[in-house]
Amino acid sequence: MGAYADFHRRSIEDREAFWAEEAQRIHWHRPFDSVLDFRRPPFAKWFVGGEINLCFNAIDRHLAARGDQPALVYISSETDTQRSYSYRELHREVNVMAAVIAAQGVGRGDRVLLYMPMIPEAVFAMLACARLGAIHSVVFGGFAAASCASRIDDAKPKLLVTADAGLRGGRAIHYKPLVDEALRLAQHPPQKVLIVDRGIDTTMQRIPGRDVDYATEAEKHAGAQVPVVWLEASEPSYILYTSGTTGKPKGVQRDTGGYAVALASSMQHLYAGKPGETMFTTSDVGWVVGHSYIVYGPLIHGMTTILYEGLPIRPDAGIWWKIVQEHKVTVMFSSPTAARVLKKQDPAWLKKYDLSSLRHLFLAGEPLDEPTHRWLHDAIGKPVIDHYWQTETGWPILSLAPGIEPATVKYGSPGFPVYGYDLKLLREADASEAAAGEKGVLTIAPPLPPGCMSTVWGDDGRFVSTYFRTFPKLQLYSTFDWGVRDADGYTFILGRTDDVINVAGHRIGTREIEEAVQAHPNIAEVAVVGVADAVKGQMPLAFAVVKDASTLQDTAGIERTEREVMAAVDRNLGAIARPRRVLFVTLLPKTRSGKLLRRSLQALAEGRDPGDLTTIEDPAALEQISNVLRT
Ligand code: ATP
Ligand code: MG
């Protein structure tokens, strides 16, 4: 048995001893009394009685050995700035921010909603909340006012921290009017709004008595030293809402001790980063990846983290690789969406910079199709590790673990169950274990490992009824994703359990059809949905974006491409899965986190209302879809 398989087995069979050891990676103010309290399943409490602070572990603990090492490097291709903060400087900034936040009446257990662009103050504010024992809830900057308002009403924050504006592709997005509108819509608006004025929106209005200017307050608190508030390990560190791809977002509540241990451990075993090195995660602080691997993970591990504001292709498609070269990045983390964007650019950009420092590139967030995986691997000449996780888990569920065993990548697979996860692939019908090569629902036998959500914020009942309802007798956590394991134990994700369509009694995952469509060399991106059909129950319908649009110039070209795509599906999956139509568009509707909004696509295709669109990236995509559906 391989080293990793042994490691994983020990994490399950000797769970408490395993995690007690991993817990030594962080600083405990008071040691825990017991490793796990699982007396009230499925609720798990890790490191009971231990006292800890995330901010102390991310900053203070490193001051003696790494005070002058860069902790945070802010790079904005939007404003063409770069600023570096050593651990000592970060400590100073976070203390000032903590003093300012505390002065607004925020203390232990209070919620603070952050609606911020990718600027250092966003990181300062997260760490400052952690220092104070306050619970942050970061809402992705740029979400519409209604999305922000519904999260405000759920979290009931005492304070909201924002900036005058964010920037995207050179365009300013004024945050303050959005925040004002959100506070008007909300039933439980916070008393105070703290504003970081970047000087972008020179017309910004302030509401006296409510709005507080950060620069003015920071001056008053210059040099402040704010003591850390030690929390019991299971006290919440933050609330983060899921992306809302499948419906109403769920408020994921994270603990403090288990999260710190899981992150410290993953930095070592999964990401194989070394203290003193640099990690570059291209996500946003508004997503779970940003929480875990822009902010807390790398800092807890004593690494330098890069905070990048901007697009992957501006000023040019070499910008990320230039960052890797200049900052000697050893660990990089991005998304399949970004990979597909880069794939459409001139490949020369990938050859222009020296990527020799880089050891691994990790991707997560949505399915990574095999052609893109292969392309990226070849282009950078380093292992590209797809790994699978959810906002709920806070760190990976399936991955390779190059910190334990060199990575042997299989294209299209995120690898093996991560240690700590007792993963089961179950037949939906009777909850029995699926055989190798057979599709099943990916489930986790509780206790969920450290780092995973402790509950749904303010609603224990919803935690149980949402996640543990698929197999209630067994009380297993459902990921709501399909998977299949091959003979070597590699797992492949086949899409979400609600993305299955039923064609004349055959159950087919839309992801499988998409993979088959993608086998056509001219398809850049595709979305398949099931639409109601009087005869067959449901029929697949494909919306595709082509790489080379010149093939679609006339009707003959369109028809030919459509026929070729259908033939590709026939060949790879069988005629039963053949889409009724393949419709060509230039843009697919996605959430702000880059995930396909299949439920809205399907609704439109069936002539229904597209539903909640507050998390959509570009509404123009839906207009286009409506137009092609009409014609
Ligand atoms: P909601 O739960 O509100 O509908 P969401 O599931 O999109 O939103 P996230 O927690 O951001 O919110 O996304 C997790 C999901 O993303 C996973 O359940 C899975 O469907 C998909 N996913 C993440 N990583 C991968 C991956 N490497 N391969 C395939 N799918 C992935
Ligand atoms: Mg989800």
Image: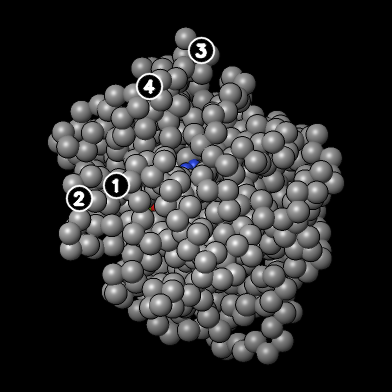
Real-space CA distance between mark 3 and mark 4, rounded to the nearest whole angstrom:
16 Å
* Disc 2 versus disc 3: nearer the observer: 2
Q: Is mark 3 within 8 Å of ligand 1?
A: no
Q: Position of residue 629 (x, y in %)?
A: 39, 73
Chain-order first, disc 4 or disc 1? 4
Query: Where is the C terminus found, in terms of image quarters?
Result: bottom left
Q: Residue at coordinates 58% horizontally, 53% vertically from top-left? A: 522
Chain-order first, disc 3 or disc 1? 3
* Disc 3 versus disc 1: nearer the observer: 1
Chain-order first, disc 2 or disc 3? 3
Q: Quadrant of residue 285?
A: bottom right
Q: Which amino acid does label 4 sit on?
A: Ile
What number is the disc on residue 347? none
Direction from residue 340 to residue 108 in the image, left or right: left
Direction from residue 12 to residue 260 in the image, left or right: right
Real-space CA distance between mark 2 and mark 3, rounded to the nearest whole angstrom:
44 Å
Real-space CA distance between mark 3 and mark 1, rounded to the nearest whole angstrom:
40 Å
Residue receiving disc 4? 12
- Label 4, residues with CA under 10 Å away: few <14, some 14-19, many ≥20: some
Q: Position of residue 413 (x, y in %)?
A: 49, 34
* Disc 3 versus disc 4: nearer the observer: 3
Residue receiving disc 3? 2
Q: What residue type is labelled 3?
A: Gly
Chain-order first, disc 2 or disc 4? 4
* Disc 2 versus disc 4: nearer the observer: 2
Real-space CA distance between mark 2 and mark 4, rounded to the nearest whole angstrom:
42 Å
- Label 1, residues with CA under 10 Å away: few <14, some 14-19, many ≥20: some
